[in-house]
Image: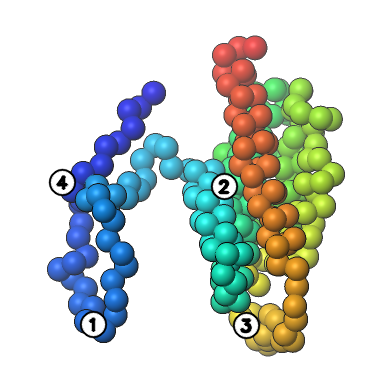
Amino acid sequence: MEPAPTRGPGDILCSMSDEIEVSDDVPDLPRPKHEHHEIAILGGRGEDDLSIAGGYLTAGDLVATRFFESPDDGLAIPVLYLYRHSIELSLKWLVRISARCALRDGYEGEERLDSERIEERLRNTHNIRQLADCLERYLNLLSNFGSNNRIDPATWKTLKWLDSEDQYGEAYRYAVIGKKQPAPVRPTQENINFYEQVNALHQLAVSLQHGYATELYEYEQFQLQGF
């Protein structure tokens, strides 16, 4: 296993302090107590859609917790977006690994599951329902995975609801969408049970990140070891 990267002031490859001028009227973010906490590590072999999905999930949990401690309606849409993007990235990672596993299991059907075709398909969609349908189809190709090789009903229910709320990954990013006839996403103000919606997305994101992903990872490892 590749050793974990270490942090230190000397590891900074680029500095913005000499390039960006900030008005004295704008307060700084609180500086960390420890100097090495100022450093972030990006990229490398450990970075993939699942690891980034985990970051969006953590960010969603942090901002949601902040909202419920001291409600701020300006945080509501960003919270929903953080969870949705975590879910989308997890689904894309799951589609990739399930396709690889299906090929190792001897799949020889008409649909192309090679990495080039899979990446083309994933680049061209942000649609949750399409990704979930694709994942379910590939799970059904595996010789022995989970309960009846399909997405469980509770997970499907939340996926379908999320798809109905933000089909193309735009409703939680913008106030106005549409190319030919732009229109407000939420033209009428309404009160919603925000906790129930956010908690459902939290549960879904965790299930994909730590449930399905773990099972498929272990499935692939067994394949690679010849079981």
Crowding near the residue tagged with mark 4, few <14, some 14–19, many ≥20 C-alpha atoms within 10 Å: few
Residue tagged by mark 3?
Answer: 176
Crowding near the residue tagged with mark 2, few <14, some 14–19, many ≥20 C-alpha atoms within 10 Å: some
Question: How many discs mark residues in the rendered view?
Answer: 4
Instruction: Say left or right for 218 vs 30.
Output: right
Q: Is residue 29 visible?
A: yes
Amino acid type assigned to the residue bearing label 2 in the image: Glu
Circle 2: element type: helix
Q: Is residue 43 above or below residue 128?
A: above
Circle 3: element type: strand
CA distance separating discs 3 and 2 = 29 Å
Amino acid type assigned to the residue bearing label 1 in the image: Ser
Residue tagged by mark 2?
Answer: 119
Point 79% across, 57% down: residue: 160
Amino acid type assigned to the residue bearing label 4 in the image: Gly
The quarter holding residue 199 reads bottom right
Crowding near the residue tagged with mark 1, few <14, some 14–19, many ≥20 C-alpha atoms within 10 Å: few
Q: Nearer the viewer, mark 2 or mark 1?
A: 1
CA distance separating discs 4 and 3 = 44 Å
Please state which of residues 58 and 100 is positioned toward the viewer in this rendering.
58
Q: How is the image coloured?
A: rainbow
Q: Are marks 4 and 3 in contact (CB under 8 Å)?
A: no
Q: Is residue 85 above or below residue 74?
A: above
Q: Nearer the viewer, mark 1 or mark 4?
A: 1
For the N terminus, give its image quadrant. top left
Q: Is residue 95 above or below residue 63?
A: above
Of the numbered discs 3 and 2, the one sitting upstream in the chain is 2
Q: Nearer the viewer, mark 4 or mark 3?
A: 4
Q: Which mark is residue 217?
A: none
Please state which of residues 226 and 78 is positioned toward the viewer in this rendering.
78
Residue tagged by mark 4?
Answer: 10
